[in-house]
Amino acid sequence: MALLVLTVFLPGSAQLVSGNRTIGKIALRVWLIALGSAVLLGLVSLFNLSTAIRILSNATTLVALQWVLYAWAALWALLFADAWRLGRPDSQPPATRRRFAAATAVLMLLPASAAYAANSVSAGRSLLAEVFVAGAAADASDGRYNILLLGGDSGAGRYGTRPDSLQLVSVNARTGRAVTFGFARDTANIRFGHGSVMAGLMPEGWACGDECLLNGLYTWAWDHRDQFPADVEDPGILATREAVEALSGLDIHYYVLVDLGGFQNLIDALGGLDVTVMRRTPIGGGTSPIKGYIEPGQQHLDGYHALWYARSRAGSSNYERMARQRCVLSAMVDQVDPRTVAMRFPEIAGASKGVLKTDIPQSELGPLAELALKTRSQKVTGVNFVPPLIQPWDYQVSELHAIVQDTIRKSDGLSDIEARTTSALVSTGADEVTEAVDGQGSTGQAPGVPATYDPLAHPNEDEFANSDDIASVCRVG
């Protein structure tokens, strides 16, 4: 039994004690080198997390790590089998022999875990290669990174991809403090910025009534891709990106597209999501019959029900649907912990293929991940350009720009204490921004701005149809 224990903590030492010393020395050296490398990487991550992530996301590193883990799994299994042999089980009493064999079988799970880790590395390498691109990183603009988050829906029976959920995340490149700006899918009358590709294609703008809405640009661009420059890989993304740049007045550095068509498998791979549903939500509707409902209350949603909760249109407004989509994404961020990822990584990586699309370069994963950790430790300010703030079909773009700049300025000006307690900024007019204090549902007043709207209050039935308030639709955590 002592030989088995030695093989657990110092593989190869059992052979040094009573077996083939050459094999023991080789195994022990490999083990100590691996431990030393892990400790070194841990120290690097403490002082420079982005460097550690850059090392671990490098394709060459991942290939080497994958095969080292496979080789180690095989060697470790042989060391356990040899330790069992060195224990001379044939000379032991039957009861002792049975316990010895059972202990050896159980400890064989350790080499199996190394093989699982190798499979996870392989899945991660494949996912990184498919999702992230090669290329140079973008420089921050005015000390900020602006990332466009799109929720597209290209499921069965739908023509093209229509990004119904459009969020622009603006992150302070130094502090990680973030602001999100939500744009309604039915935003109309979009005038593109001077010198942009879309301004050349649409000098009069995207303005032809109900047929020319923000979420329709993606499909239009792909239908007219022969009009775009030859070096444009995704005309739909370019058109949508330039539209949001025109609406927000901000330069967009990267985009991330989450395709709801493959969303179901990803949620199942995560083990489902826990969400408190505030309103009965139909499964089906529109051109198909209603097949059931997602009832109010605390619900554990599998992939099928989470997809319908994010997608359902029957009996609700576009703004409520936007809020439900944000709720599902918030639940994913809130509930995806390192243990879940480690235990289910091959499944998660496999399900993520085809769900995520981005132009973030793989070389930038380290710095952005480090920035994301700063963002996650703080409350995120959010403004949604929907009624009653603006009418998406009748607005002044200068008003939107002013709100964006004012919100960013207030976010950057918050003290550390205020940043930890602020849960949302929701505007009710061009010059009115309200700060909701996290936890109590009460409102506080931003400096020099009247507090006129509580985003945590529950609207009545008449108000609900036009509400984009995430708290009135669901709660996470």
Image (spheres, rainbow, N blue to C red):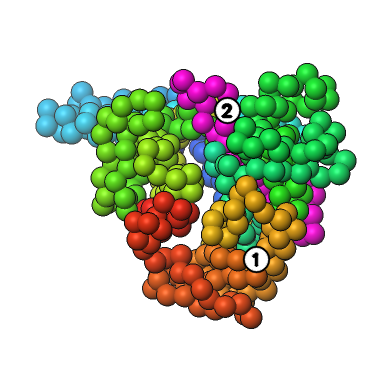
In the rendered image, the quadrant that contains the N terminus is top left
Amino acid at circle 2: Thr
**Amino acid at pointer 1:** Ala
Q: Is residue 131 above or below residue 434?
A: above
Mark on residue 323? Answer: none
Mark 1 and mark 2 lie on one chain; the one further toward the N terminus is 2
User: Residue at 29% across / 46% down in the picture?
Assistant: 280
Which residue of the protein is positioned furthest toward the bottom in this rendering?
Answer: 448
Task: Let me know if residue 140 is in the magenta part.
Answer: yes
Disc 1 designates what residue? 430
Vertical side of 3 occupied by 140: above or below: below
Q: Nearer the viewer, residue 196 or 276?
A: 196
Instruction: Point out the image quarter for the C terminus.
Output: bottom left
Q: Secondary structure at mark 2?
A: loop
- Residue 166 falls within the magenta-colored stretch: no
- Give the CA distance from mark 1 to mark 2: 32 Å
Say which element carries label 1: loop
Q: Are marks 1 and 2 in contact (CB under 8 Å)?
A: no
Percent of width and height locating residue 27:
50, 33
Above or below for 259 versus 52: above
Q: Residue at x 60, y 36 (%)?
A: 210
Neighbourhood count class around disc 1 (C-alpha, 10 Å): few under 14, some 14–19, many 20 upward: few
- 15 left or right, relative to 141: left
| Image location (x, y in percent) of residue 283 | 32, 34
Q: Give coordinates of residue 266: x percent, y percent.
A: 44, 33
Magenta extent: 138-163
Q: Quadrant of residue 242?
A: top right
- Nearest the eye: 225 or 387: 387
